[in-house]
Amino acid sequence: MDNVLTANDQTAASEAPEHKPFLEGLFEGDTGTLDYEQRRAVTTLVRKRYVSEVTDAEIWNDILEHEDVIRSSLNNLFLTLTVDKRYDVAYAQQAPSGSANPFPNALKQSASLKREETLLIIYLRIYYHQQFASGETNVFVDREDLENYLDPLFNKDAVDHVAAKDRVAKAIDEMTSKQGYLIKVAGQSGRYRISPVVASLFPLERVKELKEKFEAEAPESPRATDGEAQDE
């Protein structure tokens, strides 16, 4: 039997909404399903250690608006997404594989830290907590304070004091240029703002474990701060 459209069928067909793709391609041959802002957010989270409202306000807002889509796209790359609204930061991390074979790592920034960098994280995290708990939302630190904190590393422990000082300088620069845990203050040489991502990435319990480990292994190593940090 031949298919015949009645007048009512033709009217219904003409009134049916036309199907439109999710978005038009951003370049020739583009078959992606994310728009420009969503792709930019995913790319930034893969390339940078973190995104914050202070340093990347536009991308931060895109993440808040499209959090589920961005998280799903990162999951496709074996990555997880953390959006910490207390500190206004977001970051991607390698997803645990649950087996002896880790997933391929798509992140551009390494999360591993050297000894000097780990000691700096201990100092920055506890100092940030102390200042934040006292009501400071923007926490600053001077390069001289960081160098003095690590001074024992190149006093008794190091034979080559020049090389040790160089390692400390590189650790501070690493915290600034690559990891982004320290943000240079414009017009003030040697002064930094501590990024709130330090508080989000490094819970106090983990920092306490690191501190105890270093103190047990090297009694002459620098103390994190004069006072003990309390849980937030």
Image (cartoon, rainbow, N blue to C red):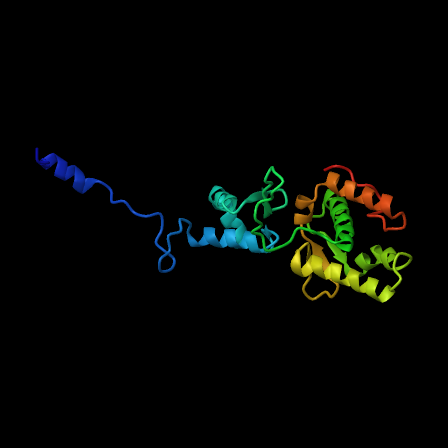
**The C terminus appears in which quarter of the rendering?**
top right
Residue 179 image offset from top left, x and y in percent: 66, 55
Q: Is residue 3 left or right of residue 148?
A: left
Can you name the residue that lies furthest to the right here?
156
> Does 12 appear above or below 219?
above
Q: Is residue 51 left or right of residue 205?
A: left
Residue 164 image offset from top left, x and y in percent: 83, 62
Q: Residue 11 appears in which quarter of the rendering? A: top left
Which of these two is toward me, 227 or 119?
Answer: 119
Can you name the residue that lies furthest to the front here?
100
Which residue is located at x 17 percent, y 42 percent?
Answer: 14
| Number of marks in picture | 0
Which residue is located at x 80 percent, y 44 percent?
Answer: 211
Which residue is located at x 51 percent, y 43 percent?
Answer: 75
> Does 64 appear above or below 5?
below
> Does 222 appear above or below 184?
above
**The N terminus appears in which quarter of the rendering?**
top left
Residue 120 image offset from top left, x and y in percent: 77, 53
Which residue is located at x 54 percent, y 50 percent?
Answer: 60
Which of these two is toward me, 56 or 108?
Answer: 108
Which of these two is toward me, 150 or 160?
Answer: 160
Residue 174 image offset from top left, x and y in percent: 70, 59
